[in-house]
């Protein structure tokens, strides 16, 4: 029997007892537990945060037998038991204002049954503070507090100001108990996808150490290249065999598809563990991370802020922006970065600017496919075919065919976007050509009112210029004047230059001329 892959298993104890494979992170976990007290860690979803929290729970509960054969066994000699308060906010949808209070109340009742209750404590936060205090008094040991997905309610309420404000004030007061009961706390870790700005949930928690972009802990979740080779060489070989590849080709495809997360500048790449384990388990490459559901709040944000998608792939930003999200924030970038759709690609030390980009092919292709139905009339179920037909036309040199398909992508521009027609058509073209670019070579530039583009396949080169409310002939003339096709003069492939005009009146491409 082969390895049991812990796909979607987030509980350390059941993972160990049932013999699932575990990539040993316990040396790092020991360091975390021993060198600090209050931590915050942000990672994209499905990145192993819950398993990390669950492993810490088992450690603080002193469950020595679960750590047999792991690094922790070598370093930990005491195995003391601490009272652990574990709060998982991932389990609810938070559709009503009361849903959060109900969940917290449920946890508090459970804890009060163990550590006692004081009727005089009114309000969730006072009850929480009381539980922390009594847990210490009753056991003689300070408390470990583990909060998983601390921000889930806030994310669910993006775009609903009233509900978000209500969740914020509840959580702010609740998490405030970590500050007031400091003397009774041994360790605390909060994990989540996003870091809601200092002014909101955490304003009272200035003692929280954020390790999200800390060099020491860059690989505390996810799988590094070294861990991949050390733990999964046989699996890579099996995957390669199943897909008619060599070992090296399989490594290369895994890297292209799932690697590429960087949590500080120049850090080694981290693989998405969820996609990796699924790939080994099913012995086929897929968009596994994407299939577990992409948050619609991202699209809401992009549309709300009239975001130019072209910028996304060339985004530059500062650490202040990466670190904070406020409900009032008008910048979708921190949410997109922290959700795992963009990652750090480069760093310019003076002026301390981060360059962001898509981490890997799975994310880029998945995200663009996900956006397509929101920006075009193409239904979600048809988006793959529509793009594939477009690419087939491009590959076979059928210019009228692919231009007509472009028109269909641009048809039915939603009325509310008509005011920003230029942005809309740039966004649609960006999505389409970014998807085409996974199978052909695309160079794409945009500036006010126009786009120039080079599409290359094995047999053809298309040099295209798009104009807004000009004429297709003008666009073609511009290609000639600026000699855009010159680099391909000696090319054996067939070179086409195409001038395209986009009309804001018909809100679509009205003409193209080919040379």
Image (spheres, rainbow, N blue to C red):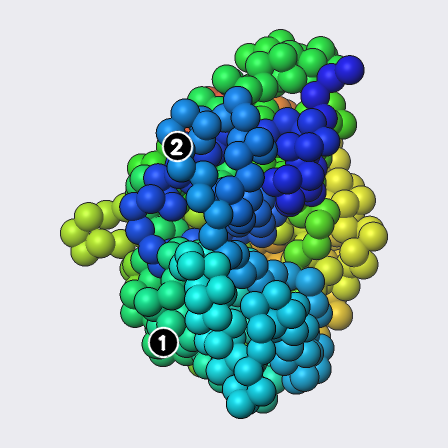
Above or below for 227 versus 133: above
Q: Position of residue 52 (x, y in %)?
A: 52, 45
User: Can residue 352 be seen from the camera position used here?
Assistant: yes
Residue 77 is marked as 2
| Number of residues whose C-alpha sits closer than 10 Å to that of mark 1, classed few (under 14), some (14–19) or many (20 or more) | few
Residue at image position (53%, 79%) is 127
User: Can residue 322 be seen from the camera position used here?
Assistant: no
Above or below for 253 versus 122: above
Residue underneath mark 1: 180
Residue 60 is marked as none
| Residue nearest the viewer, comparing 322 with 38 | 38
Left or right position of 244 against 266: right
| Mark nearer the viewer, 1 or 2 | 2
| Number of residues whose C-alpha sits closer than 10 Å to that of mark 2, classed few (under 14), some (14–19) or many (20 or more) | few
Above or below for 74 versus 140: above
Name the image quarter holding the N terminus. Answer: top right
Distance, label 1 to label 2, CA atoms, is 31 Å
Left or right position of 263 against 377: left
| Residue nearest the viewer, comparing 137 with 343 | 137
Residue at image position (44%, 71%) is 133
Residue at image position (58%, 14%) is 233
């Amino acid at each position: 029997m082969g390895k049991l892959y812990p796909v979607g298993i987030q509980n350390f104890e059941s993972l160990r007892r049932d013999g699932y494979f575990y990539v040993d992170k316990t040396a790092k976990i020991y360091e975390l537990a021993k060198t600090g007290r209050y931590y915050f860690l942000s990672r994209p979803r499905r990145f192993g945060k819950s398993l990390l929290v669950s492993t810490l729970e088992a450690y603080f509960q002193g469950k020595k037998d679960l750590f047999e054969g792991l690094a922790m066994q070598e370093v930990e000699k005491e195995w003391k038991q601490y009272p652990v308060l574990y709060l998982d906010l991932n389990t609810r949808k938070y559709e009503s204002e009361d849903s959060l209070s109900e969940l917290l109340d449920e946890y508090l009742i459970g804890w009060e049954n163990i550590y006692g209750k004081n009727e005089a404590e009114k309000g969730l936060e006072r009850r929480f503070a009381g539980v922390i205090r009594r847990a210490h008094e009753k056991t003689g040991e300070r408390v470990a507090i583990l909060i998983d997905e601390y921000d889930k309610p806030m994310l669910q309420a993006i775009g609903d100001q009233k509900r978000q404000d209500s969740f914020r004030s509840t959580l702010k007061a609740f998490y405030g108990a970590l500050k007031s009961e400091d003397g009774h706390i041994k360790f605390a870790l909060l994990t989540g996808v996003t870091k809601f700005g200092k002014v909101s949930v955490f304003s009272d928690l200035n003692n929280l150490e954020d390790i999200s972009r800390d060099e020491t802990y860059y690989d505390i979740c996810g799988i590094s290249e070294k861990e991949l080779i050390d733990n999964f060489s046989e699996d890579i070989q099996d995957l390669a065999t199943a897909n008619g590849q060599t070992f090296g080709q399989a490594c290369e495809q895994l890297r292209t598809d799932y690697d590429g997360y960087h949590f500080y500048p120049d850090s080694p790449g981290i693989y998405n563990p969820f996609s990796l384990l699924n790939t080994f388990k099913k012995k086929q490459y897929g968009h596994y991370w994407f299939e577990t559901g992409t948050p619609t709040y991202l699209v809401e944000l992009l549309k709300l802020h009239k975001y130019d998608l072209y910028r996304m792939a060339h985004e530059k930003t500062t650490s202040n922006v990466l670190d904070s999200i406020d409900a009032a924030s008008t910048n979708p970038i921190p949410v997109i970065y922290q959700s795992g759709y963009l990652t750090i690609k480069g760093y310019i030390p003076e002026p301390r600017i981060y360059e962001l980009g898509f981490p890997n092919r799975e994310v880029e292709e998945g995200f663009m496919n996900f956006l397509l139905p929101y920006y075009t009339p193409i239904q979600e179920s048809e988006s793959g075919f529509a793009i594939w037909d477009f690419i087939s036309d491009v590959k076979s040199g059928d210019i009228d065919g692919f231009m007509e398909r472009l028109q269909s992508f641009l048809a039915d521009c939603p009325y509310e976007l008509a005011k920003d027609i230029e942005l809309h058509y740039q966004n649609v073209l960006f999505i389409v050509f970014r998807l085409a670019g996974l199978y052909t070579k695309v160079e794409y530039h945009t500036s006010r009112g126009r786009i120039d583009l080079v599409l290359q396949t094995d047999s053809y080169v298309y040099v295209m210029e798009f104009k807004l409310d000009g004429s297709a002939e003008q666009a073609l003339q511009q290609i000639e004047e600026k000699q855009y096709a010159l680099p391909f003069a000696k090319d054996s492939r067939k070179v086409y230059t195409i001038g395209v005009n986009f009309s804001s009146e018909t809100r679509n491409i009205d003409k193209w001329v080919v040379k």
